Image (spheres, rainbow, N blue to C red):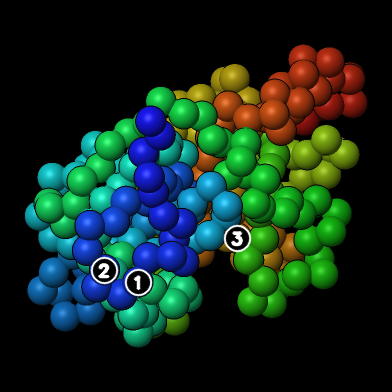
Amino acid sequence: MAAFYKLIPQISTFEKNWTAKIIVAGKQAPKTTRNNISRYQNLLLMDLEGNKVTAIIYDTNITTLADELTLGKTYMLSNATVKDNRNEFRGSLEDKVWTITAKTKIEELKEDNLNLLFSRYELTAFNKLERYMDSNEEISVIGVVIEVRQKRIIQTQFGTQACLQDVVLIDKSFQTIILTMWDTFVENECITIIDNIGSKPIIWVTNLKVSSYNGLTLSTKVNSTFFINPAIVAVTDYKEWLSNRTNKFLLFF
C-alpha cells in the first residue's frame, strides 16, 4: 500500500504526525546569524505538484544532517516544526516555514523526479536577458561553461571584502554571458565546475540577478541554486548539441 502523505499547503501550523513527499529544490550554504550566536541553513523544498516551502536547519543539526536532504533527491519527510513565516530570513517568502531537527524523520526514496523539478522553472535565453537588467526578477538559465576566470577579492560598499569568480557560459544560439559567482559559490560550486571544466560542464542555475555592471552580466544571489550536469532531458539535448557542434563553436575553445 502506498504511503499516505500531504501536499505542502495541506500542512498546518504546529501540526503533528504528518508526512510530506518532497524534492530538495535548493540548498544554501550554512550561514551565521547577525548576532554571531548561532548558525542556520536554508533549504527550498517542493512537493510533486510544485508547491514550495523554505525549511531551516540550525546549529549542530547542520552537521548531523549534512549527508541528508541532497539537492535534487526525493524524500518522505515527517514532523518538521511548522510555523508562520515572519520573513525572518531573506529568500523565504512562503506563508509557512519548516524547521528540521534531529527529531524529523527523513527517508530517501529511489525516485527520479528531476525532470518534474525543472519543469517548474522557466528558462530565459541569453538574448532575452536585457529586459531583466537591474530588476528584482530572479531568472533561471542553462548553458555550457567554456571558461573559468581567476577569482578576485573586492571591497564592498559595506566595508567588507567579498570573493568573486567569473565563469563564461554559452548557449545553443552561440550567445555568451559572464556569470559572476560570489563568496560561498566560489568556495563550493565553482570548484566543482573547475574540476569538470575539461568536459565542458552544463549548468542549470536558478534565481540569478541580471546586472548592468561592466555590461550585461549575471550574478548569484543568496538563494541561487546550481545544478551541474543534472540528469534531465534539457542537459541530454545540450550534450547532443555539443557532440555535433560546428566549427563556429570550436572558436570558443
Return the mark for residue 208.
Answer: 3
Disc 1: CA contacts within 10 A as few (<14), some (14-19) or many (>=20): few
| Contact? badges 1 and 2 (CB < 8 Å) | yes
Callout 2 secondary element: loop
* Residue 192: mark in rendering: none
Q: Give the image location of residue 103, x and y in percent.
A: 12, 53
Horizontally, is 81 left or right of 177 in the view? left
Binning the other alpha carbons within 10 Å of mark 3 as few (below 14), some (14 to 19) or many (20 upward) gives many
Task: Point out the frontmost of discs 3 and 1.
Answer: 1
The x, y position of residue 151, in whole percent, is: 46, 48
Amino acid type assigned to the residue bearing label 1 in the image:
Ser
Identify residue type, mark 3.
Answer: Leu
Residue at 30% of width from left, 65% of height from top?
Answer: 98
* Residue at 46%, 66% in the rendered image: 9
Residue 15 badge: 2
Q: Considering only vertical position in the picture, is 117 above or below 87?
A: above
Which circle's residue, 2 or 3, is located before the other in the chain? 2
Q: Tell me the CA gap for discs 2 and 3.
A: 34 Å
